[in-house]
Image (tube, rainbow, N blue to C red):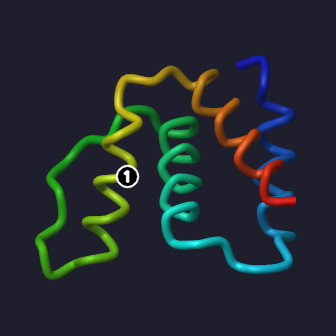
Amino acid sequence: MKNIEFFDAAVKKSKMLSERPSNKILLKLYALYKQTTVGDIIGKRPSGFDFKGAAKYDAWEKEKGKNKEKTASEYIELINSLF
């Protein structure tokens, strides 16, 4: 992956945000991170009572099929937009 150094830097940069992003942005960051580092989601969606788990699953599932270069670039762009 060509963007690996930039991606790693963006992950470190994400820990230096001065304020907490909205839940929508946090879910997008989570999904892009997981798609970049793990790949397509597998397993069953958590039950409806696990609201956080279900939201994370749904966000990651939306990234399904995207290649790691694409999601790494999107992650980097999103992090940079928050600064």
Above or below, comparing residue 32 to residue 1 in the picture: below
Please give the residue where the numbered disc 1 appears in the rendered image.
Answer: 59
Say what secondary structure mark 1 lies in.
Answer: helix
Above or below, comparing residue 10 to residue 36 in the picture: below
What residue sits 56% from the left and 64% below the top? 26
Q: Quadrant of the C terminus?
A: bottom right
Query: Label 1: few (<14), some or many (≥20) within 10 Å?
Result: many
Q: Is residue 61 left or right of residue 20?
A: left
Above or below, comparing residue 22 to residue 81 in the picture: below
Q: Amino acid at mark 1?
A: Ala
What residue sits 77% from the left and 38% below the top? 7
Q: Is residue 9 left or right of residue 57?
A: right
Give x and y (percent) for residue 53.
30, 69
Instruction: Choose top left, top right, bottom left or bottom right for residue 72.
Output: top right
Instruction: Choose top left, top right, bottom left or bottom right for residue 17.
Output: bottom right
Above or below, comparing residue 36 to residue 66 in the picture: below
Give x and y (percent) for residue 76.
75, 40
Number of callouts in the render? Answer: 1
Give x and y (percent) for residue 25.
57, 61
Instruction: Choose top left, top right, bottom left or bottom right for residue 77.
Output: top right
What residue sits 78% from the left and 17% below the top? 2
What residue sits 38% from the left and 47% below the top? 60
Give x and y (percent) for residue 1.
70, 19
